């Protein structure tokens, strides 16, 4: 079996580790997670790694090199409800396959490799995302330990039940010396690579998320009262706000550089400050999604370091 087939088969097997029959639902510190980690732990060992599990529940597989520094690889193995089988596990399986290749050839690199299989990214069970990586980064919020899930189980108790010690999560912070970098392979959750017929994309940044709750105050009224002065239907400003948000998103979505790469060619030559021409080609790709001249104008203006010339201005 070649490495590609093995990665796919292992993703299929992890998909069977679910708390809900007929779909993939693998929450943090659940029985499904325990079963998935048993598989991942064994695959790490087969690849020549020394395996440990930290207090939050991350699996860490280490393949020693000849130097003191470490290069990190990995992703998460928890899931959202009714998830796709490659969202998270693909990155862990490819990382293990890379180490397996070095191990099979008896090759030791001038730095160590450490594969991280994060126990929580999605926040499905407790509504608090990135528990695994935040613990490694030393950014875990201890107040999260008091959160309860839908069944009333407190996070601290769930961690104890799964073999961790919530009072020692501070010890999960990275303490292995110099880190050369972190690499995560992830399934594309969009149409760009498929639309372009490309096998792989290399990105220079990822999207950050901000969530806001906006309350619109108005009054429900029947059609007969439309002529009355001072009545405000909440649906109208809500629709206007949504329309404005979509227009703004189309304008700024190309404000961060994005590199798309194929096996033998790179569409965007620079991942930091691409030229106007290269970024314009990039804009054409994503502009197909937005169907917006403003999206292209925003991208080109960013590349040329000038204010955008929006329509109507």
Image (tube, helix red, strand yellow):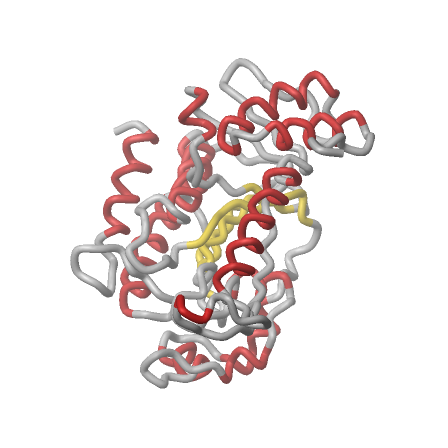
Q: Is residue 218 left or right of residue 148?
A: right
Picture residue at 17% right of the left edge, 60% below the top: 21
Picture residue at 49% right of the left edge, 72% below the top: 55
Residue 301 drawn above or below residue 242: above
Q: Say which of 185 and 149 sits in front.
A: 149
Q: Tell me residue 242's x, y (percent).
A: 54, 53
Say whether residue 71 is visible: no
Picture residue at 64% right of the left edge, 21% below the top: 268
Q: Is residue 13 left or right of residue 305?
A: left
Q: Tell me residue 263's x, y (percent).
A: 49, 18
Q: Quadrant of residue 279?
A: top right
Total count of labels: 0
Residue sitting at the far top: 264
Q: Say which of 44 and 273 sits in front.
A: 273
Q: Say which of 37 and 306 sits in front.
A: 306
Residue sitting at the far left: 21
**Quadrant that contains the C terminus:** top right
């Amino acid at each position: 079996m070649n490495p590609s087939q093995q990665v796919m088969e292992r993703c299929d097997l992890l998909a069977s580790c679910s708390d809900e029959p007929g779909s993939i639902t693998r929450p943090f510190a659940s029985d499904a997670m325990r079963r998935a980690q048993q598989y991942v732990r064994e695959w790490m060992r087969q690849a020549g790694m020394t395996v440990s599990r930290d207090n939050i529940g991350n699996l860490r597989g280490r393949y020693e090199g000849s130097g003191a520094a470490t290069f990190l690889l990995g992703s998460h193995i928890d899931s959202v409800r009714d998830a796709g089988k490659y969202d998270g596990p693909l990155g862990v399986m490819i990382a293990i396959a890379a180490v397996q290749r070095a191990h099979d050839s008896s090759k030791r690199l001038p730095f160590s490799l450490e594969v991280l299989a994060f126990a929580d990214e999605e926040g499905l069970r407790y509504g608090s995302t990135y528990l695994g990586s935040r613990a490694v980064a030393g950014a875990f919020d201890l107040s999260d330990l008091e959160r309860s899930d839908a069944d009333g189980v407190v996070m601290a108790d769930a961690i104890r039940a799964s073999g961790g010690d919530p009072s020692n999560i501070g010890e999960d912070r990275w303490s292995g010396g110099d880190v050369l970098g972190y690499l995560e392979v992830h399934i594309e959750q969009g149409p760009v690579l498929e639309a372009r017929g490309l096998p792989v994309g290399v990105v220079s940044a990822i999207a950050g998320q901000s969530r806001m709750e906006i309350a619109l105050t108005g009054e429900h009224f029947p059609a007969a009262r439309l002529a009355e002065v001072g009545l405000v239907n909440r649906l109208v400003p809500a629709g206007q706000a949504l329309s404005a948000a979509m227009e703004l998103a189309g304008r700024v979505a190309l404000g961060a550089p994005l590199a798309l790469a194929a096996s033998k060619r790179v569409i965007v030559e620079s991942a930091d400050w691409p030229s106007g021409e290269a970024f314009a080609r990039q804009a054409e790709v994503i502009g197909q999604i937005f169907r917006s001249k403003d999206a292209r104008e925003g991208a080109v203006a960013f590349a040329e370091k000038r204010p955008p010339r929006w329509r109507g201005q």
